Image (cartoon, grey):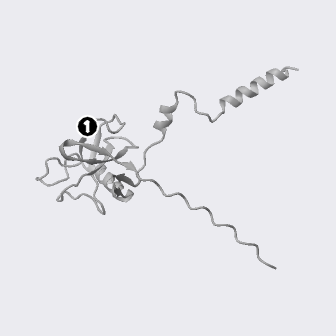
Amino acid sequence: MLFDLKTTVLFGLLALAQASPVSVPGTAEIETRAKSKKVQDYMCGTVTLQKNDIGAALVKGRASADRTEGNNGLRNKFPHYFGNQPAIFGATAELREYPIIEGGTFQGQMWPGTYRVVYKKDGQQDFVGVMVEGNGGTFTICAPAPTAPEAPPAPPAPPAKA
């Protein structure tokens, strides 16, 4: 016999350990990077910004050349560079910001408000997050809005009587 029982058990345990779904120390960073952020509803204080408004701002910002949106009364036209200082987002790429307008998109003639979508200048998965721009160059990150739990499935119908 080529393998005895001890060798077979040892190889079986080794295979089981390699296929284990338990997280291996040192892989947390890789797992975190693998989870890309998605556009969804965000909470900025007590205000909930809708996924559609955030998505519309992201699409319009991506499609616009830097500093081309806005009237001459605005100090900064959009989209424009966001320096991430202090570092409120974990991204190190070159970032851009664009106004989020509730119920529409920024048209340039209007005041841009304080809500911003932040995205990477270049890249496929470029959505970084949502923030509020305050007075004096202060920035507050917004959190993803909690999602409503899924409703439990309906109970099965009682069997038909014959």
The amino acid marked with disc number 1 is: Gly
In the image, taking residue 89 as reference, residue 29 lies left or right, namely right
Q: Quadrant of the C terminus?
A: bottom right
Give the residue furthest to the bottom: 162
Residue found at x 40% / y 43%: 125
Question: Residue 112's spot in the image, x, y percent?
Answer: 21, 55
Residue found at x 53% / y 57%: 149
Say which of 84 and 86 sits in front. Answer: 86
Say which of 25 and 109 sits in front. Answer: 25
Question: Residue 130's spot in the image, x, y percent?
Answer: 33, 48
The vertical placement of 33 against 43, above or below, is above
Tally of numbered tags: 1
- Residue 52 occupies which quadrant of the picture? bottom left
Residue annotated with mark 1: 83
Q: Quadrant of the N terminus?
A: top right
Question: Residue 102's spot in the image, x, y percent?
Answer: 30, 60
The vertical placement of 14 against 32, above or below, is above
Say which of 81 and 142 sits in front. Answer: 142
Give the residue furthest to the left: 73
In the image, taking residue 23 as reference, residue 136 lies left or right, namely left
Secondary structure of the residue carrying numbered label 1: loop
Question: Residue 146's spot in the image, x, y percent?
Answer: 45, 53
Give the residue furthest to the right: 1
